[in-house]
Amino acid sequence: MSLVVVFALVAGGIAAFSLLVDEALDEEVKRDRTCCWDKHATVASVARRIGIRIPTSAIDRRAGVKENDRQTVAVIAFTVPTRLAESYLARLVPEDERMVAPTWPDGSAPPEPDSTFRHLGLPEPSTVGPHSGVRTVNLCPDAAGKEAVHLKHCVDVYRLAVNGTADRTRLYFRSVVAGQ
């Protein structure tokens, strides 16, 4: 067998192996995005687990808990009138913190998270784009905001106008509640 044939066989084997690995990783990513959602999670149970108090006038309340080998992530989202959202966030976010557009230090948009909010039928707030006006902050139980004393875990908070209107705001909360 000539050296060219051996090289071609080795290169072909490497290419085939690479395709199989890529396909397996794609399947794992797809499975991770759809797998392991707690079918018994309710808005009330998720709110208690994170330590979020939901305003009584909130509508379109959605929540879920996703468990995998590495971590358990709890998510919750609800819609309130914009004025209520602003007063709620003023009590939650410490005075020395501010909500900012979700970006990385180089100014680019953050990579898509694990589609937790998409599972709830909502857009991922960190990827809706800079034109949307989305703002975010990360808070932990030791934060100084009056409402933050109820937090049981660190939480990413997002604020986004609903359908581009100024009168309704959706608040999103994502928290790793176990693992990592």
Image (cartoon, rainbow, N blue to C red):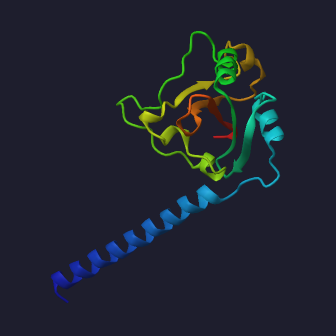
Quick one: which residue is furthest to the top in this view? 95
Residue 1 vs 128, above or below: the answer is below
**Where residue 26 sits in the image (x, y, percent)?**
49, 63
**Where residue 25 sits in the image (x, y, percent)?**
49, 63
Q: Residue at x 66, y 59 (%)?
A: 35
**Where residue 114 sits in the image (x, y, percent)?**
56, 48
Q: Residue at x 36, y 76 (%)?
A: 16
Total numbered labels placed on residues in the image: 0
Q: Where the N terminus falls, by quadrant?
A: bottom left
Does residue 56 appear to the left or right of 91 in the view shown?
right
Q: Where the C terminus falls, by quadrant?
A: top right
Res. 143 image quadrant: top right
Res. 153 image quadrant: top right
Does residue 119 appear to the left or right of 112 in the view shown?
right
Residue 25 vs 1, above or below: the answer is above
Q: Nearer the viewer, residue 22 or 37?
A: 37
Q: Residue at x 47, y 35 (%)?
A: 132
**Where residue 134 sits in the image (x, y, percent)?**
51, 31
Does residue 97 appear to the left or right of 107 in the view shown?
right
Q: Nearer the viewer, residue 127 or 25?
A: 127
Quick one: which residue is furthest to the bottom in this view? 1
